[in-house]
Image (cartoon, grey):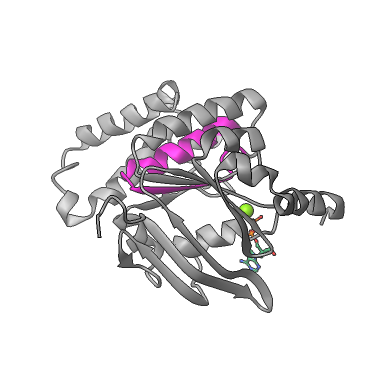
Amino acid sequence: MDMAAQPILAVDGLRKSFRGLTALESVSLEVRRGEILGLMGPNGAGKSVFINVITGLYPSDGGAIRYCGRDVTALPSYVLARLGIARTYQNIRLLRRMTVLENVLVAIKDHASQPFRSLFVRNRSGGVAAAMALLEQFHLADKADRLAGTLAYGEARRLEIARALAGKPSLLFLDEPAAGMNERETEELAATIRTSHRLVEAIVIVEHDVAMMRGLSDRLVVMDSGRKIAEGNPADVLTQPNVVEAYLGTDGADD
Ligand SMILES: Nc1ncnc2c1ncn2[C@@H]1O[C@H](COP(=O)(O)OP(=O)(O)O)[C@@H](O)[C@H]1O
Ligand SMILES: [Mg+2]
């Protein structure tokens, strides 16, 4: 098969339950090389569980995950990270008592512990230069020496993405990166994500902001109750009756 045509990620019939609660009911989807894939759906739809299973945080109950043509279904998260799958968390996870720069450096160092990468960051100064270049891109260079725990919310979100990119991943998952941001911060973040897109092969982004997702996503997948209910170009998907209904349905229920 032509390598360029092969999806970077192919998920087939992925299932996950928690004590009787079905969080993923046979979800299949592909992430294509070069794309930003938007993943939407009401709260509880299974979006985070999907990312958590793909990235090895939770074991799956069934189904197959292929990454770059290779079966990675039961691999632990640190192996998947080394293979080039990176992510951010819906709840920010930073090393709060380390500096902004150190947060990125640690991620570069983790990456460098792969034997074949050891030449790449053998000298520490090379690591610092690479980390500072990333911070520059994410408008955090002037905050390099601040403790991560003192950052404003939007800044912490940007640092999480910078850190995820420090390991030079091929596939990046962003779980609600704009959560808690105001409109201006959200617009800035969208621009940052477009920049990030040049550094990776594909991005999967979970977000509720419809305008942001319409503007950012090449394709959109919508989930509801652990199932994929729509897939396609954003304009079409967002007007599909079952998609509109899925959102209105939970707004009213407010659970
Ligand atoms: N670790 C867990 N243990 C038990 N239930 C979970 C766990 N993680 C998620 N769930 C449940 O799985 C369902 C899907 O959750 P989630 O993927 O977080 O939804 P969302 O689409 O909002 O990200 C929800 O009902 C949630 O309560
Ligand atoms: Mg979630």
Left of 49 or right of it: where is 119?
left
Q: Residue furthest left?
A: 119
View quadrant of ligand 1:
bottom right
Q: Which residue is depicted at the point 39% across and 26% down?
A: 137
Left of 139 or right of it: where is 237?
right
Percent across and percent down for residue 132 are 33, 28
Q: Is residue 56 visible?
A: no
Q: Is residue 148 visible?
A: yes
Q: Nearer the viewer, residue 184 or 143?
A: 184
Q: Nearer the viewer, residue 121 or 95?
A: 121
Q: Which residue is depicted at the point 70% across and 51% down?
A: 243
> Per the image, is 211 magenta?
no
Left of 230 or right of it: where is 83?
left
Q: Which residue is depicted at the point 41% across and 30% down?
A: 195
Percent across and percent down for residue 213 are 59, 38
In this rendering, the answer to whether 20 lies above or below 45 is: below
The image quadrant that residue 46 belongs to is bottom right
In this rendering, the answer to whether 216 lies above or below 231 is: above
Q: Quadrant of the N terminus?
A: bottom left
Q: Quadrant of the C terminus?
A: bottom right
The image quadrant that residue 68 belongs to is bottom left
Left of 125 or right of it: where is 184?
right
Percent across and percent down for residue 72 are 36, 68
User: How many numbered badges does the structure rendering display?
Assistant: 0
The image quadrant that residue 227 belongs to is bottom right
What's the magenta region? 150-178
Q: Which residue is depicted at the point 21% across and 33% down?
A: 126
> Per the image, is 169 magenta?
yes
Percent across and percent down for residue 9 are 39, 58
Q: Residue furthest top?
A: 142
